[in-house]
Image (cartoon, rainbow, N blue to C red):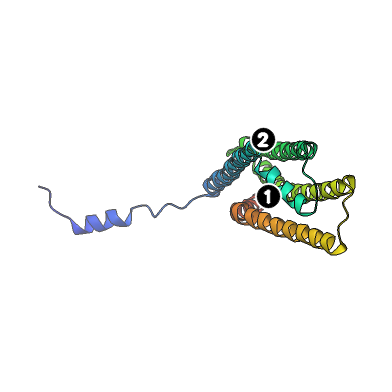
Amino acid sequence: MPEFDLDSFKKTWQEQPVQKKYGSDEILQMLNRKSRNYVKYIFWISVAEFLFFTLIGLFYIIQGKEASSFLNILERLGVQKTSELELTFDTIYLVLKIVSLSVTAYFVFRFYQNYKGIKVEENLKKFILKIIQFKKTVNAFILINIILLVTFTSIFTVFVFYILNTQKIEITNSTIVGFIAGMVISTVFTVVMVWLYYRVVYGIIIKKLDRNLSQLKEIDSQEI
């Protein structure tokens, strides 16, 4: 058995390499991978949203619950429920639902394109530009969803007054004011809830992406 040499042991221990420090290239690759993962998360969230709202929309169309709820409101205003009225509402609702799902499907495809287009080994400047473009796509998706919500509510409001006019139903000013106020309040509430949803779900990921983007820009400025 060899003798234990304390001095030799100390020398060997002192010569051990210091804990590895990551270079800028390795840091860059880690940031790139993280950024690409964040894009992937948003893509899968949008896919889940699309599937969820598609199923919900099909359920309401099959069950006719959306039509029943809306027609009940019209009946309270004195509107007579007819098969023609139900058909018109179902057509409008179906068209708006198709538009909504088409817009969501388009952005799901855009998110997928962004995800597939981001390469970890890509040139830093191109990578930064693609991340910025992705953020713009996310912001456009949120804004268009809010615009669609307001537009659809406006269309249904106009439809209500069209039916009232067609059936020559006169309602008091207080009823009109109450109806419009109710629509405005419900629309504002829904818009706020939608904004908060995207602010929480998408906002958390976008903040992390922003942090990575700042670090990537810092590395890019150091390379100049």
Q: Position of residue 193 (x, y in %)?
A: 66, 57
Q: Nearer the viewer, mark 2 or mark 1?
A: 2
What is the three-letter code of the residue carrying label 1? Ile
* Picture disc at residue 67: none
Rounded to the nearest whole Å, what is the CA distance between mark 2 and mark 1?
Answer: 35 Å
Residue 16 appears in the figure? yes
Q: Is residue 3 left or right of residue 82?
A: left
Q: How many marks?
A: 2
Callout 1: few (<14), some (14-19), or many (20+) C-alpha neighbours within 10 Å?
few
- Quarter of image, res 76: bottom right
| 36 lies left or right of 104 | left
Residue tagged 2: 109
Q: Nearer the viewer, residue 163 or 60?
A: 163
Most foreground residue, 186 or 142: 186
Answer whether residue 209 is visible to the viewer in this image.
Answer: no
- Secondary element type, mark 2: helix
Q: Which residue is mark 1?
A: 224
* Residue at 33% from the left image edge and 53% from the top image edge: 16
Compared to residue 107, the image places residue 190 above or below, namely: below
Report x, y in % for residue 216.
62, 51
**Residues under numbered marks 2 and 1 in contact, where contact means CB atoms less than 8 Å apart:** no
Counting residues from the start of the chain, the first of labels 2 and 1 encountered is 2
Describe the element under mark 1 as helix, strand or loop: loop
- Is 135 in front, or is 108? 108
